[in-house]
Image (cartoon, helix red, strand yellow):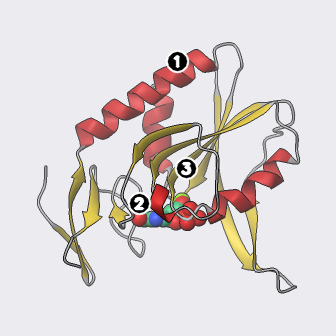
Amino acid sequence: MSALVTLFDKTFEPFLPESLIQEKIKELAEEINKDYAGKKPLFIAILNGSFMFAADLFKAINIEAEICFIKLASYKGAKSTGNVITAIGLDNDINNRHVIILEDIIDTGKTLSQFLPQLEHQQPSSLKIAVLLHKPDATIHPVHIDYCCFSIPNRFVLGYGLDYDGFGRNLKEIYQLKESE
Ligand code: IMP
Ligand code: MG
């Protein structure tokens, strides 16, 4: 695995090698292939962070399935209720569909815990969450995670779609902020 990566003011060290990431994603895909056979699930991948995870997972899905990509935008609500999350690009009708959300990482859980009720409102047949990474020690807004590749410590990670200030998404492995930083 490659050596240290420096971006702006931060140094990152190797954490999850490419081979392990690919192995876990294949296992997850096999589980989904079994659980969703005949159900024609609709995967909804959340951009930007999940694009590599979604691509590699979807390549290993061998049942009939659809995928779409959305972006979640957060804006200040008119009232003092904090930020409101809105989905950009969700053109598919999810009513009576088996939906699987693909997300790069659950950190605080805030984004998904705000967004999921909006999807539930459209009454899909089922709604499950598949994530590449979960930081249980950082999660303060509980989200029920159905499929997860890795539970990781509460430390900033980079690569394989995840960025630091827009950069580092192209790394094939996942890096972690260096211990001393
Ligand atoms: P939340 O805190 O669970 O709402 O996470 C929101 C988003 O923050 C995730 O979907 C990621 O895009 C981003 N994020 C959270 N933790 C990290 C990290 O360690 N590295 C890179 N992006 C992160
Ligand atoms: Mg994300």
Question: x, y percentage for residue 137?
Answer: 46, 61
Q: How many marks on residues?
A: 3
Tell me the quarter of the image containing the C terminus.
bottom left
**Label 2 lies in ligand 1 vicinity (Cβ under 8 Å):** yes
Mark 1 or mark 3: which comes first in sequence?
1
Q: Where residue 154 appears, x then y in whole percent?
A: 39, 64
Residue 162 is marked as 2
Q: Which residue is mark 1?
A: 62
Residue at position x 76%, y 32% from top? 126
Residue 87 relative to residue 133: left or right: right
Q: CA distance from mark 1 to mark 2?
A: 26 Å
Marks 2/3 in contact by CB < 8 Å: the verdict is no
Q: Quadrant of residue 110?
A: bottom right
Residue type at tag 2: Leu
Disc 3 CB within 8 Å of nearest ligand 1 atom: yes
The mark nearer the N terminus, 1 or 2, is 1
Q: Nearer the viewer, residue 6 or 145?
A: 145
Q: Residue at x 32, y 40 (%)?
A: 21
Dot 2 lies on which element?
A: loop
| Pointer 3 residue | 103
Type of the residue with mark 1: Asn
Q: Is residue 30 left or right of residue 123?
A: left
Element type where label 3 sits in the image: strand
Farthest residue toward the top?
A: 38
